[in-house]
Structure formats: C-alpha cells, structure tokens
Image (cartoon, rainbow, N blue to C red):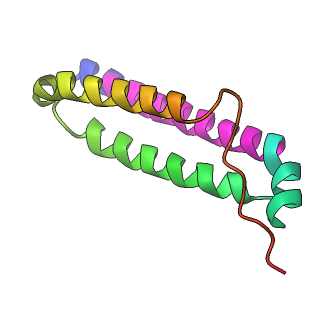
Amino acid sequence: MRRRASTHLEYHLLVLVTLALVAFGLVMVYSASSARALLGADDPAYYLKRQALYAVAGLVALVLLSRTDYRRLRHAAGPLLLASNVSTRRRSSSSPSGTTTAPPPRSK
C-alpha cells in the first residue's frame, strides 16, 4: 500500500509541474509576441491563442496516454519515431530558420 501512495503522489507532482511549465510557456509566448501580433493583426493575443490550442492538444494527449499501458505503446514506438523525424525534417526545410508565421493582415 505504501508503494501505491508514493506512485500516486509522483504522478500528481509530474502533472502539476507539466501544467506549470505549459502556463509559463504561454506567458512567455504572449510576452514575446504581443507587440508583433498587435501591429500585424490588431490582436495582441494572436500567437497566444494559437499556442494555447497546441497546449490543450498536448494536455489531452498527456491524459489519454497516461491512462494507457506503456507496454502497449512499444509496438508503436518505431512508426511514431519515424513520423516525428519526418515531420521535424519537413518543418525545418519548409521555412527559413528564425521565421514565424505572420498573423493575418488587418481587415479594413
């Protein structure tokens, strides 16, 4: 029983630290991009909203995968690794280094 309580505490601590890092990242995105987004799209939270959607998708994946037996994911490790590698290479070759997607132009 002692082992179970320790594992439960570690799980909640890991989720709490993850949520704190996601929140900190969202604050940093807003801090770094609000001026550019305001000038480009009249919406200082443009990049924040985009990043928040990805953060929510990641948190949903965290919850779903944390409830899955990790031994069942062993068979998917190879294809997932290959897909992430291809996706990363495609993304890095499609846009020059240091550029970001510009917000939509202002409506007049």
Q: Residue at x 59, y 35 (%)?
A: 95
- Report if residue 8 lies within the magenta region: yes
Q: Residue at x 12, y 24 (%)?
A: 71
The answer to which of 30 and 59 lies nearer the viewer is 30
- The quarter of the image holding the N terminus is top left
On the image, the x and y values in percent for residue 16 come to 52, 35
Residue lying furthest bottom in this view?
A: 108
- The quarter of the image holding the C terminus is bottom right
The answer to which of 38 and 74 lies nearer the viewer is 38
Q: Quadrant of residue 33?
A: top right
On the image, the x and y values in percent for residue 53 come to 53, 55
Q: Main secondary structure of the magenta part?
A: helix
Span highlighted in magenta in the image? 7-31
Q: Is residue 3 above or below residue 73?
A: above
Q: Is residue 57 above or below residue 73?
A: below
- Image check: 65 left or right of 27? left
Q: Quadrant of residue 79?
A: top left
Q: Residue at x 68, y 41 (%)?
A: 100
On the image, the x and y values in percent for residue 14 come to 46, 28
- Image check: 39 left or right of 4? right
- Report if residue 13 lies within the magenta region: yes
